[in-house]
Amino acid sequence: MRQPKIIDYALLTILSLIWASAFFNIKIATYSFGPVTIAFLRVFFGAIPVILLCYYKKIKIEAFSKDWHWFAMIGFINLVAPFFLIAYGVKSVQSNLAAILMSTTPLSSTILGHFYTKNEKFNLVKTFGILIGFSGIIFLFSDNLLIDQNNFTSALLILLGSTCYVIGGVLTLKISKKKNENVTGSILIWATIILIPLVSFIEQPWQVVPRTDSLISVIYLGIVPTGIAWLLRFKILKDNGLIFQSQVSYLIPIFGTILGYIFLKELITIKVLISLTAVCIGIYFVRRADRKELS
């Protein structure tokens, strides 16, 4: 690892923008596709750049090795379930709200880490950050202008999707000694396999005549936020480490809110801004505690 340079901060910003851009593109994709189809197309197109990179770097993909059950389980929990839940939820709520709700992942991971790892226990600073962050989410649910009885469940499903990412991350620790490219390629392959029968029987997308913008968005979701972004994440992790890379957590909800306004003219209320601020402050204190523990 090295001291971050201007190029490293530029790459971090690009990664944040890419992941933030997923939310309004999911919204556009829902205009023509169902949630299962969106999940399937994301993992299918996302697998392409990862598999090509593994082939180029001569990295063996172990999707069907003795550890196949781990890859299949992580593929379902870390890709299939959250991609479906987020797409289903975003159909009924603004994409900027989804970005804020999904940004709770670092807070949820801190809670699970306390119970399922040996060296990530709660302390006063982490507890304060978690309380502040989730207070912002609770306050967001009080915004009756954006979250009401018609889409309340959809917002909860997005939160559940963020929790799936956290659980998938914990399970990934079981195969943490394997190369990142191999793990990502393997879980993408299994996610695709799992979704083929589901999308065939539930939604039958070949009968859909999609809008052009929805088609472009779903292809973009697969290749860029799912495939290329993960490869960019690996480069940042390798060059600068986990703490530096984790700073995307602050930027994603901010960029997600801005992009939702620019591309979809989504409403930004005072409660959205307060909730966004609280979540970012909560993440800051959790990350600050992590840095102190590592040092």
Image (cartoon, rainbow, N blue to C red):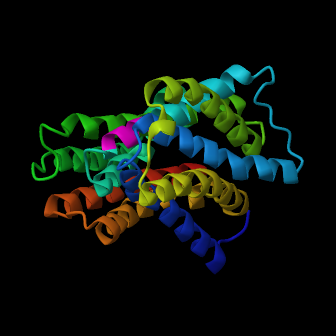
Magenta span of residues: 83-89
Q: Position of residue 207 (x, y in %)?
A: 46, 37
Residue at 63% from the left image edge and 52% from the top image edge = 227
Q: Position of residue 21 (x, y in %)?
A: 45, 61
Query: Does 88 appear in magenta?
Result: yes
Residue 188 quadrant: top right
Residue at 68% from the left image edge and 55% from the top image edge = 231
Q: Nearer the viewer, residue 149 or 7?
A: 149
Query: Does 34 appear in magenta?
Result: no
Residue at 21% from the left image edge and 59% from the top image edge = 272
Vertical arrangement, residue 137 with respect to residue 249, above or below: above
The outermost residue toward the left is 144
Identify the main secondary structure in magenta. helix
Q: Nearer the viewer, residue 190 or 235?
A: 190
Residue at 63% from the left image edge and 48% from the top image edge = 46
Quadrant into which the N terminus falls: bottom right
Q: Position of residue 232 (x, y in %)?
A: 66, 60
Quadrant into which the C terminus falls: bottom right
Residue 121 visible: no
Q: Nearer the viewer, residue 72 or 115?
A: 72
The outermost residue toward the bottom is 6
Vertical arrangement, residue 123 with respect to residue 174, above or below: below
Q: Position of residue 215 (x, y in %)?
A: 48, 54
Residue 204 visible: yes
131 on left or right of 121: left
Number of dots carrying numbers: 0
Vertical arrangement, residue 208 with respect to residue 53, above or below: above
